[in-house]
Amino acid sequence: MFKECCPELIPVMEQVAAENPHIAKLIERHQELNKIIDEVEAGREHMDELELEKLKKEKLHIKDEVYAAVVEYKKEKGI
């Protein structure tokens, strides 16, 4: 999930998720999307190309929202 792109943020992300149920749900959804996309791209599942692109955009939007929450949390806490 986020470990590939920003492993240094994982501890803060876990703290944000523990304090914010919305962010926790977004992280869960991101993980679900990651699994689905991986299965389709590996050829183990079939999906319309447009639907796959829609899921990728949703995943990116979630990543942006979670990242923004982490940055805001760090700013608030002075981390």
Image (cartoon, helix red, strand yellow):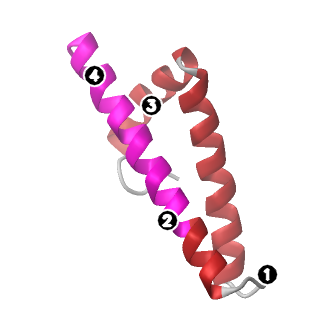
Residue at point 43% right, 57% down? Answer: 4
Question: In this rendering, does residue 74 appear at all?
Answer: yes
The magenta stretch spans residue 57 = yes
Residue 26 against residue 21 in the figure, above or below:
below
Magenta residues, start to end: 56-79
Q: Nearer the viewer, residue 53 or 66?
A: 53
Q: Nearer the viewer, residue 5 or 61?
A: 61
Between disc 4 and disc 2, the foreground one is 2
Name which residue type carries label 3. Answer: Met
Residue at point 58% right, 28% down? Answer: 22
Name which residue type carries label 1. Answer: Glu
Name which residue type carries label 4. Answer: Lys
Q: Which residue is mark 1?
A: 45
The x, y position of residue 25, in whole percent, is 64, 35
- Marks 3 & 1, CB-CB < 8 Å contact: no
Sequence-wise, the earlier of marks 4 and 1 is 1
Q: Which residue is mark 3?
A: 13
Q: Look at the numbered disc 1 and give the secondary structure of its residue.
A: loop
Question: In this rendering, does residue 3 appear at all?
Answer: no
Residue 66 against residue 57 in the figure, above or below:
above
Give the spatial CA distance, label 4 vs label 3. 10 Å
- Marks 2 & 3, CB-CB < 8 Å contact: no
Q: Which residue is mark 2?
A: 57
- Residue 21 appears in which quarter of the rendering? top right
Picture disc at residue 74: 4
Instruction: Name the residue furthest top.
Output: 77
Q: In the drawing, does residue 32 fall left or right of residue 63? A: right
The magenta stretch spans residue 66 = yes
Q: Look at the numbered disc 2 and give the secondary structure of its residue.
A: helix
Sequence-wise, the earlier of marks 2 and 3 is 3
Q: In the drawing, does residue 50 fall left or right of residue 47? A: left
Name which residue type carries label 2. Answer: Lys
